[in-house]
Image (cartoon, rainbow, N blue to C red):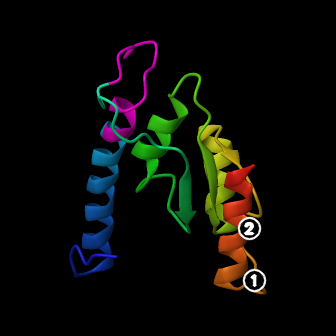
Amino acid sequence: VTLVDEGSLTKINRLAQSLDVMLSHTISQCHPTPNNKASKNDGGPTIAAIISLSSEPTTIHSASLGACNRLDGFDVPIVGSGGTSLSQIASLYDLRLVGNSGGSVASTTLTKARGWAMGLAE
């Protein structure tokens, strides 16, 4: 984890939204689609899955989630925590939740990580 900035929640949310727009461009460029038949990543990494930790899918992370939704023929699996945000991701962007994703105050971070890893491995 790298500290990118400090400040008010409003400032950090604006920064997160800006970074999300950059991520959406990366997602769009590294996966071939009908409009982008030749992938521009030249053998570089692609987005294999999304791990969402209590994200805000309606504004802050909408660009990257929308980019994943537009990847024709590539089903991006989602794992993570934050039951409300995960259900919004599934319903707003038609993306597939896998594994034991969601929230539970009785789960430890280790059991959640194991569940996510198993879900992505399937």
Q: How many marks?
A: 2
> Under tag 1, what secondary structure?
loop
Residue 83 image point, x, y percent: 70, 66
Q: Residues within 10 Å of mark 1 (few under 14, many from 20)?
A: few
- Three-letter code for the amino acid on which mark 1 is drawn: Ser
* Left or right side of 73 for 19: left
115 to 99, vertically: above or below? below
For marks 1 and 2, give the CA distance.
10 Å
Q: Nearer the viewer, residue 18 or 116?
A: 116
Q: Which residue is mark 1?
A: 107
Majority secondary structure of the magenta segment? loop
Residue at 39% over, 38% down: 27
Magenta includes 80? no
* Quadrant for the N terminus in the image: bottom left
55 relative position to 85: left or right: left
Q: Is residue 71 above or below residue 36?
A: below
Q: Which residues are magenta?
A: 26-39
- Please tell me which of labels 1 and 2 falls first in the chain: 1
- What residue do we see at 77% from left, 64% from top? 100
Closer to us: mark 1 or mark 2?
2
Mark 2: secondary structure:
helix
Residue at 53% x, 44% y is 48
Above or below residue 40? Residue 87 is below
Mark 1 and mark 2 in contact? Answer it, CB < 8 Å. Answer: yes
On residue 57, the disc is none
Residue located 67% across and 62% down the image = 117
Give yes or no for residue 34 being in the magenta stretch: yes
Using the rendered view, name the quadrant where residue 35 is placed.
Answer: top left
Q: Which residue is mark 2?
A: 115
Q: Amino acid at mark 2?
A: Gly
